[in-house]
Amino acid sequence: VTIQSTRPTRGRPLPAPRIPEWEVSTMPKIITELPGPNARAYLEKSKKYEPQSMSDQVPLVWDRAEGCVIWDVDGNEFLDWSSGVLVTNVGHCHPYYVEQVKDQCDKLFNCYDFLTQPRADLAEKLVQVAPDHLDRAFLVTTGTDATEAAMRMCRRAHEGFEIISFHGAFHGRTYGAASAAGSRGTKNGFGPMMTGFLHTPFPYFYRCPFGSETEEECGNKCIEFLDWTVERESCGALCAVITEPYQGGAGSIMAPKGFFETLDKWCKEKGIYFIFDEVQSSFGRTGKMFAMEHYDIKPDLVTLGKGLGSGVPCSAVLGTSAIMDVLPPGSMGSTNGGNPLSSRAALAAIDIIQKEGLVENAARMGELFKQRFEAIQQKHEQLGDIRGMGLVWGLEMVKDKASKEPDADFTRRIVLNAFHRGLCMIAPIGLYKNVLRVAPPLIITEQQVHETCDIFEAAFEEALIS
Ligand code: PLP
């Protein structure tokens, strides 16, 4: 569904002119109808020359961005709750990041898989920041590349080939990654998927497939069902389980306490590998450097992307030498993987995250968001469930709390209203397209948390009446 509107802006008073300085927070400023004339021209051009399969976002045509502020091609100013789909963890165009990338542009862009200093430095840095048992880093470009690489490594290092994943999971859009996915979204109409994948329920407590009364029961039932799935479907050739730490695309679904610890143990008992897909959840997003640090687990492979490059595409698989050293030279590589530009960008991003305390900021600001969302939930029937940690939140919208009937129209109206008020939100997600995702850059300030929540609340209340 394309969210399109040419509705003029409401009579909201314009804020004082923005002081164009780093880290100075102001309310957004809308100076044209939305989309403005330049934006409309680009939207037309895109319609003419691009497949429209890519996006169902609001018609915001980005021009530039700084920190948590975005300007569109008409000079309208927005605050960002998207981080460009959970990518720009360090904020848009952070000065140090820009400086490091520019410096690399003067030196070298690509040399295929010949070694460079930035690639070696990044591999070292990743192993240093990762939990101790992970001692190798393999660099690629997209999150999907990382998923594919991790699954290929498991199959190469293990005699089995079957991979278990979860209903609702998203791991990317190539055939291997889509086969691992546990929802129709990336499969529908694309023909048969690959064999060798088994799917089993993820503990989505708000809509527990087993009707559980407590989160703990929901988690336990899903673990019990794993054995059922294996007994019925496996040919005795299991090699790995892959899961996200929280299911992003399925609606920011958080697993109950203890679930991953039990799953990790289950994998170890079965003698199979545990792949933790941290493409979205790593580099401070959840209030820890890696989401795995919230749990007492030791995944064998961890996929990284998005926030790793924080803008310039970069992804990686972190793993154990026991698995990765099985791969002989030339058996896995890529044209752009670990290229010097991506590696420099990722090194700069990790530096910023560490030096500016962004992991801690994400945890602190996350608590503020939670309080604000809970206050809205207490007032309104339509905010059914709030799920999240750090700076990734899912707000599930329903007709009323008792029925839990999903309300996709209401959800879409909020995103559109927020856009008209100067807040950039990602299009609704989840099986029923009734979940709003809140994922601002990790540099967001307390003032910006409150400003954006004020805008969101107004957009929510406006959606109740229109
Ligand atoms: N895995 C997870 C958990 C993701 O959220 C995504 C992207 O949203 C991917 C994999 C795929 O990453 P990319 O779009 O960079 O290929």
Image (tube, rainbow, N blue to C red):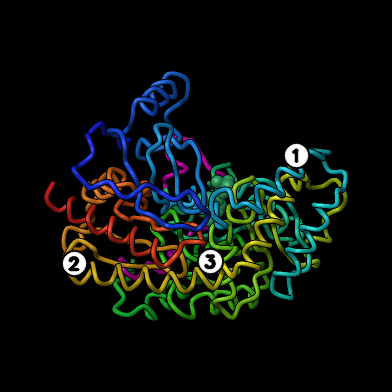
Is 369 drawn above or below residue 309 in the view shown?
Answer: below
Task: Give the magenta range.
Answer: 184-207
> Contact (CB < 8 A) between labels 1 and 2?
no
For the residue pair 314 and 99, the one nearer the viewer reads as 99
Answer left or right for 265 relative to 388. right
Relative to 159, residue 78 above or below: above
**Magenta stretch contains residue 193:** yes
- Mark 2 neighbour class, 10 Å CA radius: few under 14, some 14 to 19, many 20 or more: some
User: Is the residue indicated by label 2 positioned so its CB lies within 8 Å of ligand 1?
Assistant: no
Label 3 sits on residue: 230
**Sooner in the amino-acid sequence: mark 1 or mark 3:** 1
Say what secondary structure mark 3 lies in: helix
Residue farthest toward the left in the current orientation of the protein: 465
Q: What is the quadrant of residue 339 in the picture? A: top right
Give the image location of residue 375, x and y in percent: 24, 71
Q: Which label sits on residue 289?
A: none
Of helix, strand and loop, which one carries label 1? helix
Q: Rate crowding at label 3 as few (under 14), some (14 to 19) or many (20 or more) other CA atoms within 10 Å.
A: some
Marks 2 and 3, Cα distance to the nearest angstrom?
A: 35 Å
Q: Residue furthest top?
A: 48
Residue at 37 percent across and 75 percent down: it is: 218
**Mark 1 and mark 3: span between their CA atoms?**
50 Å
Q: Position of residue 433 (x, y in %)?
A: 32, 50
Mark toward the start of the polypeptide (2 vs 3): 3
Judging by the rendered image, the residue that carries numbered circle 2 is 401
What is the CA distance from the residue labelled 1 to the residue labelled 2? 53 Å
Which residue is depicted at the point 41% across and 61% down? Answer: 252
Examine the rendered structure and indicate whether residue 241 appears above or below residue 298.
above
Residue of label 1: 105
